[in-house]
Image (cartoon, rainbow, N blue to C red):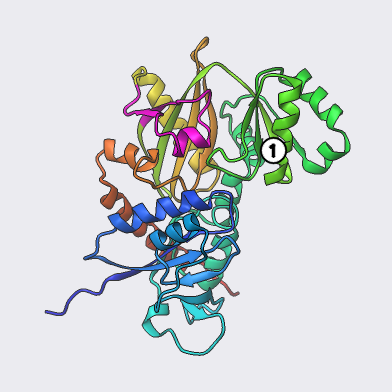
Amino acid sequence: MAEKKKIRVGLVFGGRSGEHEVSLASSNAVMSHLDQEKYEVVPLGITKEGSWLLGTEPRHLIAAEREAAGLVETAQTTAVTLTGDPSVRGLIPVQGGSDLGSQGELDVIFPALHGTYGEDGSLQGLLDMANIPYVGCGVLGAALGMDKEKMKMIFQNVGLPIVEYYAFRRNEWERSPAHIMDEVEQRLGYPTFVKPVNLGSSVGINKAHSRQELEHAINVAAEYDRKIVVERGINCREFECAVLGNDEPLASVVGEIVSSNEFYDYRAKYIDGKSQAVIPADIPQETAEEMRRQAIQAFSALDLNGLARVDFFLEKETGNVYINEVNTMPGFTEISMYPKLWEASGLTYTQLLDRLIELAIERHEDRQRNRTSM
């Protein structure tokens, strides 16, 4: 009996993003949990400068960047690009030269990328042009899931409750900073949260309690994106729910984040290790069910596929539930909420990866049914 052919998974990580380091940690965990009997993993590391390196594993890129000594070059490392020719369906060398052979052929891409140029629709468009199945949502869902302003507009349109916010452009801030701060104070008051619109992992986010802090927070956010959003701060508990599926998505149990800092910032998420996850969350069943319902509604409203983590606020004084945002490629580290929520819902990390790859292939096959000519 012939041995069953393994599925070749192109694991893409790193990237030109403020969340580059988070991506390395996520991909390292994904690689260690993929079933080696089912999959052949093809590591594709993207440097901070944007070069695609075939054969560079996450741990090598991590070590090299920590030492600030440049990339670790191995015999297997080749600079590659993704061809836009669907008949090739794989990788080609940047400099021409030797054919990659079977090493360049991929069955599915797992983009363990967070933030810009990976989670915002850019990579998804490239993969669609190459006609390669990939884990996660398509161009539209990725772009909407990354843009906090447009996301909130859609949430409002479908009746999902959100906290009040004010969004503006960097050029507006540079032209009229006093006017922007006056608007924030009149509309929202203090405290407020200031965020770059197109970024995740709490990068560039600060809480402001005064006009001086507000000015500093906006200046920081403006370093990361041309759009800034300011949200009214509320006295709340923070919750997360994981969604899995395509056209018939399922929601996990709800978990609570107890942050070690004043809010769940980058340090609290990835550095100090003191934040706690309570899974399942200690809340009334009807509250958890409402969050799960809203999570699926948000997933469908943004036209998402594959996976998403949906974040919520529960206001302490009123008990009101507010949807905060979705993350279309949540962290996959050992301490990340998305795999932990599904583990508490009955799926191991390895089983979760299996299902995500199945969903990627199912979505791709469904897209092949579309007519492309008259």
The kind of secondary structure element at disc 1 is helix
* Nearer to the camera, 277 or 217: 217
- Image: magenta residue range: 254-281
Horizontally, is 243 left or right of 177 in the view? left
Residue displayed at 28% across by 54% down: 33
Q: Residue furthest left?
A: 1
Q: Amino acid at mark 1?
A: Val
- Above/below status of 183 relative to 5: above
Q: Residue furthest bottom?
A: 97
* Nearer to the camera, 249 or 254: 254
Residue displayed at 72% across by 34% down: 218
Residue 173 placed where, x, y %? Answer: 81, 37
Asked where in the image residue 7 lies, by quadrant, the reply is: bottom left
Residue displayed at 56% across by 69% down: 51
Asked where in the image residue 156 lies, by quadrant, the reply is: top right
Q: Is any part of residue 300 visible from this angle?
A: yes
Q: Which residue is mark 1?
A: 220
